[in-house]
Amino acid sequence: KTSSPKCFIITVYPAPGPVPKDQVRLYSMRFCPFAQRTRLVLHAKGIKFETINIHLKQKPDWFLEKNPDGLVPVIETPAGEVVNESVITSVFLDEVYPEKKLLPATPFGKAQQKMMLEHFSKVCLFKISSARRKGDDVSGLEAELKEKFTSLNEYLVKRKTKFFGGDTITFIDYMMWPFFERLGMFEVQHCLDHTPELKKWTELMLEDPAVKATMHSTENHKTFYNNFLDGKPDFDYGL
Amino acid sequence: NFSERCRAEGSPAPGPVPKDQVRLYSMRFCPFAQRTRLVLHAKGIKFETINIHLKQKPDWFLEKNPDGLVPVIETPAGEVVNESVITSVFLDEVYPEKKLLPATPFGKAQQKMMLEHFSKITPQLFKISSARRKGDDVSGLEAELKEKFTSLNEYLVKRKTKFFGGDTITFIDYMMWPFFERLGMFEVQHCLDHTPELKKWTELMLEDPAVKATMHSTENHKTFYNNFLDGKPDFDYGL
């Protein structure tokens, strides 16, 4: 990884050159939970990659040319293929790089992981923190969240596995992780109190090398997020 | 030989899926289930259909799919897959004849990114029709829809292809079709007036055998949809 982690903004850095032949390039933002999914896959599979962080409030024109949506994560290959969306990039990388497969081999195994992800995507953590900031009562939203955590917990209990795809970490665990890493930031970590297997899963995830390589502490997450909600995000916080 | 009439609460549970086919749980007018039906027909997969009464769901259906939604695919091995896109990909992976998804990881990623873009259009269609029903002014919403159609049209023009994945029908065309089939039902067919390539695409799709096997006329769609919006859906309309 040779690029500076400081994010590229239009007035400071020119367009990057082509992606070197033996790696992929990730366009990212250091605190983005969606980009963290792709970073987890890159680390877990041992893929050689470089990162270019983007200033998400002052996006470079050259970035918008590659991805008109303007969002991260984006993966660019030496052949100039551009893939965006966190899940699409993650699946793409798992398919291109055969070592350490994260998705199951069978069509049904893959479908099961996608159905789990679909369920998980209905968990809405951002709603709770914006309600709390406005001073609204969050007890109803927290009760909903606890129900969803209970249902995730029951899944682990019923399958008797440590992780969501079996006894080793697979794709679905990495797709879910960035949001669980941020439970402290969202001030809902107490919602895990009655779901011991799910709590244990978070502890096991924290021991994973890819998680360790991509995570931030709750304090750093909180600082970034509060600045972001105040309209003054510091994408380079901590550098 | 199964009756097309929908099965409601209290109806007996169906037996296991016969060994040489798959079973689709569906509803005759559902656009999401139509995606899976298009894939089944296009690939020549042997299947039986059980239509579900979506306001009085049988217990045995909720046991298979607690979400209670269609489409659901069940295999002879008892594997249950739900969600329109997940079932469609699953079928394309299990049945090797007439592949609908591209062979390469990037080709698959491109189709998924197109589908992600398209998925922003579907909620707008429902929004326009419920706004119109309430007597609200829909010109703003229709303008937004026209912009999205223009962007889809430009995609076809730029690639110089008849369909969204090339010169033959592929996965992405089938995933998008059910909503275009219903433009008359949503009373927005005029929004295609300035997008000739997109309009031509709809005409080509209407000639496809899988589309012909699964479609309804605009009048039938309108009748069903109006009853549905009035709270009195007739899932067996036309039988």
Image (tube, coloured by chain):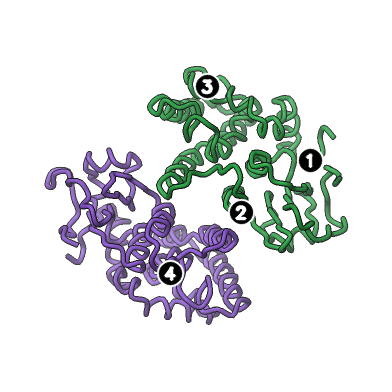
Chain colours: A purple, B green
Q: Nearer the viewer, mark 3 or mark 2?
A: 2
Q: Is residue A32 left or right of residue A114?
A: left
- The residue sitting at 74% across, 63% down in the picture is B63
Which residue, given by chain and number where applicable, does mark 1 sit on?
A: B235
Give the alpha-carbon distance from disc 1 to disc 3, as whole Å: 29 Å
**Discs 1, 3: same chain:** yes
CB within 8 Å, label 1 to label 2: no
- The residue sitting at 57% across, 52% down in the picture is B93
Give the alpha-carbon distance from disc 4 to disc 3, as whole Å: 44 Å
Which residue, given by chain and number where applicable, does mark 3 sit on?
A: B192
Q: Chain of mark 2?
A: B
Dot 4 crowding, Cα within 10 Å, few <14, some 14–19, many 20+? some
CB within 8 Å, label 1 to label 4: no
Dot 2 crowding, Cα within 10 Å, few <14, some 14–19, many 20+? few
Residue B227 screen position, x and y as percent: 76, 35
Give the alpha-carbon distance from disc 1 to disc 2, as whole Å: 30 Å
Which residue, given by chain and number where applicable, does mark 2 sit on?
A: B94
Q: Secondary structure at mark 3?
A: helix
Which one is in front, A61 or B129? Answer: A61
Q: Chain of mark 4?
A: A
Residue type highlighted by circle 1: Phe
- The residue sitting at 49% across, 18% down in the picture is B196
Q: Is residue A219 above or below residue B201?
A: below
CB within 8 Å, label 4 to label 3: no
Q: Secondary structure at mark 2?
A: helix
Which one is in front, A196 or B110? Answer: B110
Give the alpha-carbon distance from disc 1 to disc 4, as whole Å: 41 Å
